[in-house]
Image: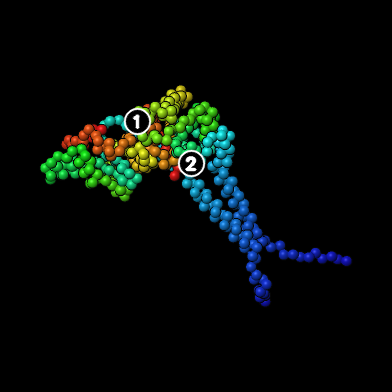
Amino acid sequence: MAFRRLTHENRKLQMVSLIDLIFILLIFFIITSVMIKMSRGEAQLYIPTPKNEPGEAQVLIQILDEEEFLWVDHTAIDTLNLYTYKRRTALNIQGKVDLLLQKMTLDSAGLRARLDALMAESAADPNKDYFVLIRCPDRLPYYRATALIEELVDLPSFEYGCVAGTIEDIRNSRGIQVQGNVIQIDL
Amino acid sequence: MAFKRPVTPRTLELTSLIDVVFLLLIFFMVTFAYSLTGELSESQEYADVALPETKTQLPVVTDDRLDNLLIQIIPDTSGGQMFRKVFVLWPTFSDTLRISRGQAFSSAIKDSSFAAFPPDILSLAGEEFATLPPCTLITNSIRRYVATDRIYRGNGHPVVEVRAEETTEFKIVNFIMEQCSALQDAIPQIIIRTKS
């Protein structure tokens, strides 16, 4: 059987069709990139209504700034007690706040680690209830607080409160007292 | 005399075929995207009421069905200063009729169910802030919504939705959350709609 060799003319590239296709591909990728941006849309966060009643909280998370958080839990009592024991002097409110800020301020990664630890603790003891109080300064974008709430809402044993407030409010509070295993902040 | 038809090979032009298929694909993708957002029709609706122009990243309304009370916070920079406007969008309580957010937005304009925060809200104390027109609008709307929902929907739990850009000040969103918190048994859940 004889095969016919391709002649040089048969190998010619159709430039018009090629450019046509390239343009269409270009338009296709432009539109898909726009659609990817559009499809991000708006995030919907379903949160239980916060319980903003005076009472005890196991954890206080004070949002300090965009990337800084003050985490106050039962370990803060040890921090304050240890300082008082070593120095043999009692701290005033400003001193206590400064000490807590120095020892217990977290960045985003630190906060993530603390939240993970808290969740592991909660999973280990499902009967234990936790109340987390989130305080956020008025001036900050609200998503700083809602992003934190989002981390907590899926856990059944958690309740939370969400209030406005700055670290200066705590510094100027009427008192911070350690009584037993409880820190009382009298705002 | 016998005529002979010229025989031409009937091959399919693959390049043209791909060309047409891509064009059709792009056409359907674009039309589908528009039908999802409904921005064309809604922006027309928005223009009809001659509101001041805003520089918001949020589309003002979308075609989504509205089932809950929606409090929408929109930034406005039209006067040179940035201040936020609050629109309260009401759902219908009918079992057979549903309205879109666009329709609810038009109703909010017609019913004057909107108010603007002053630019200096962060300097206002809590009580002073709570007496601002947008705050009283929010408070009254939430209370009225709960009462109306009890009448029309019976045992169902009303849900409040908050829609705002993520840069919105915590003070505003917290005020809404506080109002819901004060009626916690009535409003067990809040939906936060955020656009980055």
Q: Relative to A146, say whether A6 is above or below.
A: below
| Residue A150 location, quadrant | top left
Q: Residue at x 64, y 55 (%)?
A: B20
Amino acid type of the residue tagged 2 in the rendering = Thr
Q: Are marks 2 and 1 on the same chain?
A: yes
Name the residue carrying label 2: B56
Colouring scheme applied when the structure was drawn: rainbow
Q: Which residue is at the far top?
A: B151
Q: Residue at x 58, y 55 (%)?
A: A27
Front position in the image: A155 or B3: A155
Q: Residue at x 65, y 65 (%)?
A: A14
The chain to which mark 1 is attached is B
- Mark closest to the chain's N terminus, 2 or 1: 2
Q: Which residue is at the far right?
A: B1
| Residue A172 location, quadrant | top left
Q: Position of residue B56 (x, y in %)?
A: 48, 41
Q: Position of residue A107 (x, y in %)?
A: 30, 48
Name the residue carrying label 1: B126
Instruction: Tell me the quadrant of the picture where the N terminus of chain A can be found.
Output: bottom right
| Residue A57 location, quadrant | top left
Amino acid type of the residue tagged 1 in the rendering = Gly
Which class describes the residues within 10 Å of circle 1: few (<14), some (14-19), or many (20+)?
A: few
Q: Can residue A5 be seen at all in this image of the molecule?
A: yes
Q: Secondary structure at mark 2?
A: loop
What is the CA distance from the residue labelled 2 to the residue labelled 1? 27 Å
Front position in the image: A126 or A154: A154
The chain to which mark 2 is attached is B
Q: Relative to B20, say whether A158 is above or below.
A: above
Q: Residue at x 47, y 32 (%)?
A: B87
Determine whether, in the image, residue A33 is placed left or right of residue A52.
right
Q: Can residue B150 be seen at all in this image of the molecule?
A: no
Which class describes the residues within 10 Å of circle 2: few (<14), some (14-19), or many (20+)?
A: few
